[in-house]
Image (cartoon, coloured by chain):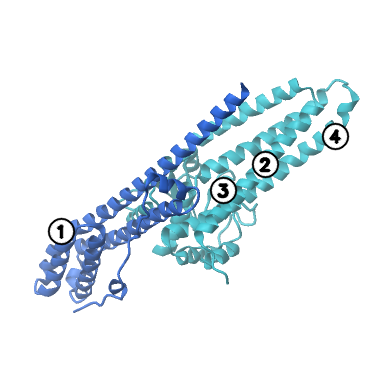
Amino acid sequence: MALLWWLLGIFLLIVIIFAYYYNRFAVLRNRIDNSLSQIDVQLKRRADLIPNLIETVKGFAKHEKAAIKAVTEARKALVSAKGVVDKVKADNQLESALKTIFAIAEGYPDLKANTNFLELQRELSSTEDKVAYARQYYNDSILTYNNLYTTMPGAFFAKLYGKKEKEYLKITETERKNVKVKF
Amino acid sequence: MARVDFHDQISNNKWKSFFLMAIIFIVFVLLGYVISFAFEPGFFFIIMIISIIFSLSYLLISYYNSDKIAIASVGAKKATREKYKQYYNIVEGLTIASGMPMPKLYVMNSPQINAFASGRDPNNAVICVTTGALEKLEKRELEGVLSHELSHVANYDIRYMTLVTVMVGMIAIISQIFLRSLWFRSGDSKNNGIFIVIGIIMAILAPIIVQLVQLAISRKREFAADASAVKFTRYPGGLIKALRKIQIDHFPEEKKVNKAVAPLFFSNPFRGWGSTHPPLNKRIEVLEKM
């Protein structure tokens, strides 16, 4: 009955392959979801740093109402934004408002030298880097998923399991243009 | 100048290192095969068992403690977040870009620009950087170096190279046992003779050959780590500038660095020694194409 063993073996192999692809899609999908929430984590950190920054700036340059308002507004927009695309857009707004504040701070030597201010500036800069990395990783995890989705034999299983192709996080053309610093 | 995609670079070098590993394995099997013809199978079996026991013990001990051993052997100190903010910030950013957990960070006192990573998997990883690197490198250059080190962890290079080292070690042990045991052979049948000759030749050449192959594997993994570093930072310029700085950095040979740990380092801490790393020129050349 050697034939029976062979058939059993082949059957087992097929089951394993089907399970592997099912699991692989699940794992990659989870990774994408996780990386999305990572972007949220970094954006939240940025938003949390802003109130402290505003207070410090007000302590030295409270007449710069327009710039301070811009940052406060941008932060509000960031916190209330829904969906990753809107959140990233709001973060871009925040970044340009911050650039204005930091440029203005150049004219206030006391503010510029304030350790709290410097610390916040550094933190905000590093969280901006981290937001960028989180977005990059999100797109990378989508690439991995799409690679599996579009190549064989993944494509076959994708059809079978009803998977859909995923979209990258895109920046619209207007945001790609260099943001001008307004005084 | 043809552009190179870092994804391809990563996978090409991983495949190359895999095939080189297969060569070592084939040498191992051939050696065993020839020896088993030269001796009775029973004796050969004993040789195999002994070498496996030695290698496995070495493997398990060094593998599970690779991070601690590496750190201890160079006298590195834990880096505190307060004192090394930029170092922590950079690595945190990279762990986000790579989806990896945060490794433990260490600093070692040395004027050379260098760094290494160790640990059997990403959850038990350490990265160590020299004070020279922290002082002499700009932020994006340091980021390139740290990204390269993190890549070693991400590519499981420590596990990989340990495996290779073990196989090379086993071949060396088997060869040694075989050569030494020739003294104690009683007069056996003559048709073993040819295999004994082949066995001797192999026992002498095999360890040398696989050592060279091991170095070749190490170089391929280094190229892969450079490419992975670019994958995380998406900025080859940082790493290129750091490598250029290392090129012009002149220092007397580091006495503290143990030869066993040297392959882990970012660039050869010994100048003109064996080539665990590809030449700096070649690395820069490849990076410039990305």
Q: Secondary structure at mark 2?
A: helix
Identity of the amino acid at label 3?
Answer: Ala
Q: Position of residue B276 (x, y in %)?
A: 61, 51
B285 left or right, relative to A106: right
* Earlier sequence position, callout 3 versus callout 2: 2
Q: Residues within 10 Å of mark 1 (few under 14, many from 20)?
A: few
Q: Label for residue B197?
A: 4
Check if mark 4's residue and mark 2's residue have beta carbons within 8 Å: no
* Earlier sequence position, callout 3 versus callout 4: 4
Q: Which of label 4 and label 2 is nearer to you?
A: 2
Q: Label for residue B24?
A: 2
Residue B149 in sight in this render: yes
The image quadrant where one finds the N terminus of chain B is bottom right
Q: Secondary structure at mark 3?
A: helix
Marks 4, 2 in one chain: yes
Residue at image mark 3: B262
Looking at the image, residue B226 lies above or below residue A8: below
Q: Position of residue B233 (x, y in %)?
A: 42, 60
A105 left or right, relative to B172: left
Identity of the amino acid at label 2?
Answer: Ile
Residue at image mark 1: A80
Q: Which of label 4 and label 1 is nearer to you?
A: 1
Q: Residues within 10 Å of mark 3 (few under 14, many from 20)?
A: some
Q: Which of label 3 and label 4 is nearer to you?
A: 4
Q: Chain of mark 3?
A: B
Q: CA distance from mark 4 to mark 2?
A: 21 Å
